[in-house]
Image (spheres, coloured by chain):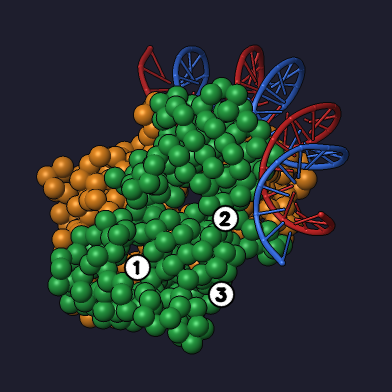
Chain colours: A green, B orange, C red, D blue
Amino acid sequence: MFDSKGLLPASQCTRERINCRDCAIRPHCFPVNLEDGELQQLNGIIQRHRPLQKSEHLFSAGAILTQLYAVRSGALKTYLLSSEGEEQITGFHLPGEILGLDGLGNFRHPSFAMALETSMVCGIPLARLEALARSMPRLRTELLRVMSEAIHAEHEQLRLTRKTAEERLAAFLLDLSQRFRQRGYSAQNFILPMSRCEIANYLGLTSETVSRLLTRYRDRGLVEIRGREVLLKDLRRMHQLCGHCTVSADE
Amino acid sequence: MFDSKGLLPASQCTRERINCRDCAIRPHCFPVNLEDGELQQLNGIIQRHRPLQKSEHLFSAGAILTQLYAVRSGALKTYLLSSEGEEQITGFHLPGEILGLDGLGNFRHPSFAMALETSMVCGIPLARLEALARSMPRLRTELLRVMSEAIHAEHEQLRLTRKTAEERLAAFLLDLSQRFRQRGYSAQNFILPMSRCEIANYLGLTSETVSRLLTRYRDRGLVEIRGREVLLKDLRRMHQLCGHCTVSADE
DNA sequence: CGGAATCTTGATTAGGTTCAAGATGAGTGG
DNA sequence: CCACTCATCTTGAACCTAATCAAGATTCCG
């Protein structure tokens, strides 16, 4: 499927090369706590996909869920569509994060997942995962861990509903910053993978408010902004701004 | 532990009598999809607890998580406490719902659980649950289902952040209504187990706003309210009010 | 280079909070 | 059984934050 689309010559086909064992983001991915042998077993069932282009869907609401997905590179958003067709973004997903957990209940995706930039994902076929889980207690534990952390992260997100726009956006930027740092990128300086509009949607604000807040932060010397490039100049004051409400869930 | 507190004579001790098999809320509880033999195995590890009195904690943030809990009767709230000591309610829990899922990740509770009224819960010791999961594929599936549904429910909750107070409260009441109905109670007429203040906290509003909205609904002939007793007189218009955003996740 | 999408900034408006004062209700002790 | 107290709830008035509407500016992309 990879080669048939002619996107990469077979020699460079990541399907052949990539192995969980030496995956750069393994420390932040699902199999972080597995031992070598277990890792190889998991690796054996992973499906590598061709890269997703920007705006391409990984899955859509209503579709049967046959795999979970781990982000390998790039960034995706997940969102719900209401009956009136309005989008509610439920999360932004960086390398190492798992997609599809919300559909495990009835094996149907309730949400959409779309690439925000060119992205690679690893597919984890459910049937084979379940088979592996039978004999690998640690894999069960890891699966529960990932889901539990997702639930906890959502709860933390709930905290923001009572906060002002200023606090919410600050918390959002700090959360992104920390996730970039965990993945070996700069915590101060990064490129937003999403538009103002998407940030606003996620936070329950309007894009105008997000714009205004960013310039307000800039006027106070907290940040520098150029398009989607962000420089957090004063993490400490930023933390104070959001009332220390930063999600410090993992790490 | 039960008898030692002298709360109930041994003859009435629910620990002896209750069995998952003939539990009234089994259709809405964790083991809904288990077969008879499996059910008996699960039943064998369940710990019955003495009733929780109103305002009593089931667990506290920071505590080691050794059990999951299924609500048997009554109602509980779960909440987070910020570093400044402010409470954020993360959920209200009716019979059949599972508590503690957010702490499975690192085996510590991140949240508090408090009884809103006299309540009974069943404890499910983690160690024994894991042992059972080893040999019972369906139990694993069920565990994933419960967690997946929790994640999805949180996502649905996120939708409310962009809605007006009026829509949020309507969605909240309809959600409660539906959950009562599922459990065999009236969908129109029920007693709120929580205060206005707690509703407001959960929805990101103030108790004044909740009060005002309830009287507004009343003035429009949508509801009748007397203290904590609620009568939903026009479910259809109520649904229109909240933009059909009702969480119809399960069922 | 041109067109479209995204972003910024301004002026106005509305929804919800805050502050404040009563009303209601539940629990307690005389 | 009633009075008292405390917590919860209701209602009002003023204020404020963020949304809306609108017009430019900038960036992206073919």
Q: Amino acid at mark 1?
A: Leu
Q: Considering only order in the chain, which callout, 2 or 3, is on the residue closer to the N terminus?
A: 3
Residue at (39% x, 83% y) in the render: A10
Q: Is residue B224 visible in this depiction of the protein?
A: no
Left or right, A178 with reference to B211: left
Residue B18 image offset from top left, x and y in percent: 25, 64
Residue at 50% x, 78% y is A7
Q: CA distance from mark 1 to mark 3?
A: 19 Å
For label 3, the residue is: A62
The chain identifier of the residue carrying mark 2 reads A
Q: Nearer the viewer, mark 2 or mark 1?
A: 2
- Which residue position holds label 2? A89
Residue drawn at point x = 14 percent, y = 72 percent:
A37
Residue situated in front as seen by the camera: B63 or A103? A103
Protein chain holding label 1: B
Does dot 1 land on a helix, a strand or a loop?
Answer: helix
**Distance Cα–Cα, label 3 vs label 2:** 17 Å
Q: Nearer the viewer, residue A234 or A66?
A: A234
Percent of width and height locating residue B111: 34, 42
- Label 1: which residue? B144
To the question of a shared chain for discs 2 and 1, the answer is no
Q: Within 10 Å of the Cα at label 2, are there few (<14), some (14-19), or many (20+) other Cα atoms?
A: many
Give the crowd class for mark 1: few <14, some 14-19, many >=20 residues within 10 Å.
many
Question: Which mark is in front, 3 or 2?
Answer: 2
Q: In this rendering, is residue B71 above or below B44?
A: above
